[in-house]
Image: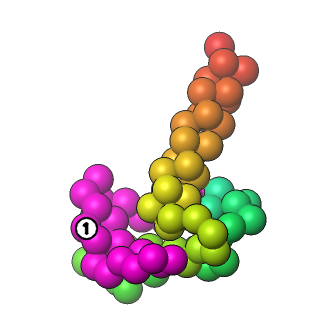
């Protein structure tokens, strides 16, 4: 996965997330939207074969990059919990 910052402000960030698709971005969006400080979390894949996925996050009272980091930490926690349950 390669992440490129397209645009960043105090309360928003727009990223290109190369090497990912709906599988990861939909999960990330889900966990972002669980955060009460996240106002908008959306992604777009302009073309399923050649498009580079873009993620947009707008927050209130929280740094958007920190919100993305926390959402990824929650994904990791959920994966660890699943692995423990199936072993």
Q: Is residue 41 left or right of residue 24?
A: right
- Range covered by the magenta-colored residues: 1-29
Quarter-of-image position of residue 42: bottom right
- 72 vs 29: above or below: above
Which residue extends farthest top?
A: 87
Residue 73 visible, this orientation: yes
What residue is at 55 percent from the left and 42 percent from the top?
Answer: 73
- Badge 1 crowding class, 10 Å Cα cut-off, few under 14, some 14 to 19, many 20 or more, is few
The number of numbered badges drawn on the structure is 1
What residue is at 63 percent from the left and 69 percent from the top?
Answer: 61
Residue 10 shown in magenta: yes
Q: Is residue 2 left or right of residue 39?
A: left
Q: Position of residue 57 (x, y in %)?
A: 52, 74
- 1 vs 51: above or below: above
Seen from the viewer's position, the closer of residues 15 and 58 is 58
Which residue extends farthest bottom?
A: 46
- 7 vs 5: above or below: below
User: Which quadrant would the C terminus be assigned to in this image?
Assistant: top right
Seen from the viewer's position, the closer of residues 41 and 49 is 41
Q: Position of residue 53 (x, y in %)?
A: 37, 73
Q: Secondary structure at mark 1?
A: strand
Residue on which disc 1 sits: 4
Q: Is residue 45 left or right of residue 3?
A: right
Residue 49 visible, this orientation: no
What residue is at 28 percent from the left and 71 percent from the top?
Answer: 5
What residue is at 72 percent from the left and 21 percent from the top?
Answer: 85
């Amino acid at each position: 996965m390669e992440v490129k910052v397209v645009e960043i402000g105090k309360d928003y960030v727009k990223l290109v997330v190369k090497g990912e698709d709906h599988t990861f971005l939909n999960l990330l969006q889900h966990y972002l939207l669980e955060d009460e400080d996240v106002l908008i979390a959306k992604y777009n894949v302009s073309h399923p074969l050649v498009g580079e996925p873009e993620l947009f996050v707008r927050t209130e009272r929280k740094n958007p990059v920190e919100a993305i980091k926390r959402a990824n930490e929650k994904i990791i926690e959920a994966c660890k919990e699943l692995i423990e349950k199936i072993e």
